[in-house]
Image (tube, rainbow, N blue to C red):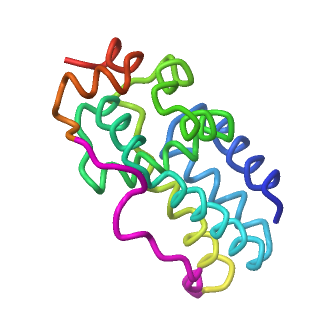
Amino acid sequence: MYETDFWQLIDESRDTAEGDPDEQAEALVERLAQLTPDDVVDFARLFEARFQRAYRYDLWGAAYLLLDGASEDSFDYFRCWLIAQGREVFEGALHEPDALAELVPDFDEEEDGEAEDVGYAADEAHEQLTGLPLPDLGVQQPRRPEGDSFDFEDATEMAKRYPLLWARFGD
């Protein structure tokens, strides 16, 4: 599976679900279950690579503002949601996390920002196809996020790092 195929599956499932993360996960499982088990494993590897790329303190800070707080689990679900938004939003957020204020102008903290089930879509599809769990992808999460840590509760620091997000979501 090529990267373009990966993003096409993400986009099609999001469009089908009209942006609802739970429905997107279901649509993604349906689409993946139409592929070969090898393609599903390839999708899972591509997803995991992006999930790991987004394991950064600067993105965690952005998630903290968008979600009005973000535990480690919440940040995991946020990274799934970020991937589920498609390539433009994902790459834009990696380039400049504060740009999320413009990349997702209709962000609603009650509805958006968490898509845990999207992260398990390949697992579910593989099990449907083979009756077996997804094999180990051989990818391990780093011990700590990339970049320098900082205090997400320091309003001055957060306003300085994320002026656009702070203007919309800060205290």
Secondary structure of the magenta portion, mostly? loop
User: What x and y, as percent, mark residue 8?
Assistant: 77, 47
Q: Is 88 above or below relative to 54?
A: above
Q: Which quadrant of the rendered structure holds the N terminus?
A: bottom right
Q: Residue furthest front?
A: 148
Would you say residue 147 sits in the magenta stretch? Answer: yes
Which quarter shows the C terminus?
top left
Q: Residue at x 57, y 62 (%)?
A: 121
Is residue 65 located in the magenta-colored stretch of the structure?
no
Q: Which residues are magenta?
A: 132-150
> x%, y% of residue 124?
56, 70
Classify residue 68 by image quadrant: top left
Question: Along the horizontal axis of the image, is 94 left or right of 155?
Answer: right
**Residue for point 83% across, 61% down:** 2
Question: Where is residue 145 drawn, in percent x and y?
Answer: 38, 57
Q: Nearer the viewer, residue 28 or 90?
A: 90
Instruction: Depth check: give the residue in front, 39 or 64.
Output: 64
Tell me if 144 is positioned left or right of 120 in this view: left
Q: Residue 127 sits in which quadrant?
A: bottom right
On screen, residue 39 above or below 93: below
x 57%, y 83%: residue: 138
Q: Quadrant of residue 158?
A: top left
